[in-house]
Amino acid sequence: MGKIIYSKYDKKLIGELPRVAFPGKITVVISETEAVKAVDYLLAQPVLGVDTETRPSFSKGRHYEVSLLQVSDNQNCFLFRLNFLGMSDSIVRLLEDTSVPKIGLSWHDDLIMLKRKGRDFKPGYFIDIQNEVTEIGILDLGLQKIYANLFGMKISKREQLTNWERDILTDKQKMYAATDAWTCINIHEELERLKKTNDFELIIVEEEEKSEAATTISDGEKLDISNDSSRNVRQEKNLKGRNTRQTKSRKTLSQKKSPKRAKQNNAVTDNDSRKITLKDDEL
């Protein structure tokens, strides 16, 4: 049996997963001399993971430039502190390189932020995970959900809204930044493996209002799964106030008795597909 993946991963499940952390060496780069050596090393690797960090703003109308560029292979991650380095020659050389694939997530947005630092460059060889996941049916676009879906592990996001322009980054910030870049490599390589081997089963998770049935299609077998219980859980979560709960509850009871709704429970089989359809809260 192949790996089971979901078109949409239930965020409530992520908190119970074991945490993943970059296992290699993390090096902070603050001078051009250090950056030259780091870029020489990185461009000799077969594949790289990339990401950026920006100091968050909690005041209306105030924005900060990107503070950090993290680039990793499987053993070493370099944290280029752009608030000290700026867009130096070595940084531009790395970003314009066309020989080594650099894997990122929503990387188009990162490139825009990097260009705003005052030096134009022509982006080199970049691959965006968000484009790759859709090729196998995954609809989630966030790094945390994608990683949980593919590996059953959690990427902690606690340090995301910390000050990335502080004089000295904390160990937690360093680990957060390195992990984000490194996990992009893992995701890319796993997606490539799945596309090549087709060794997976995709469970299509539909929105509640769009479907009342769950249809399993696997090797010609069909399974129809009722979804009344999961619908009630979602309704309880969304109700606001006692009156709204009562209204929703009556609506639910009415829907259960509706002949039209019963017809929706008929499963649809596609012999050329290997997909399993479930509702959000059945995961």
Image: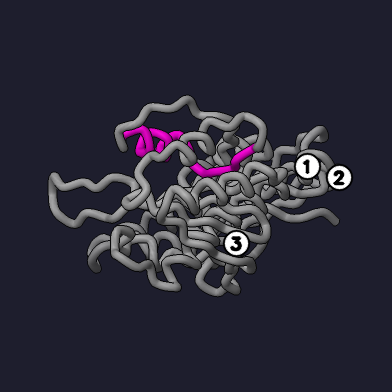
Could you tell me which secondary element the residue under label 2 belongs to? loop
Tag shown at residue 219: 2
Q: Which region of the structure is painted magenta?
A: 101-116
The quarter holding residue 154 reads bottom right
Q: Distance between the residues labelled 3 and 2?
A: 21 Å
Could you tell me which secondary element the residue under label 1 belongs to? loop
Query: How dense is the environment of label 2, judged by Cα within 10 Å: few (below 14), some, or many (20 and up)?
Result: few
Q: Mark 3 points at which residue?
A: 283
**Earlier residue among tags 1 and 2:** 2
Could you tell me which secondary element the residue under label 3 belongs to? loop
Left-right relation of 106 to 65: right
Task: State the image coordinates of residue 236 (x, y, percent, origin top left).
Answer: 38, 65
Q: How far apart are marks 3 and 1 (CA)?
A: 18 Å
Amino acid of disc 3: Leu
Residue at the (13%, 49%) spot, across then down: 60
Q: Which residue is the extreme one toward the left?
A: 60
For the residues bearing labels 3 and 1, Cβ distance under 8 angstroms: no
Residue at the (53%, 66%) spot, across then down: 14
Residue at the (62%, 29%) spot, across then down: 98
Residue at the (42%, 35%) spot, across then down: 111
Q: Mark 1 points at which residue?
A: 274
For the residues bearing labels 3 and 2, Cβ distance under 8 angstroms: no
Quadrant placement of the N terminus: bottom right
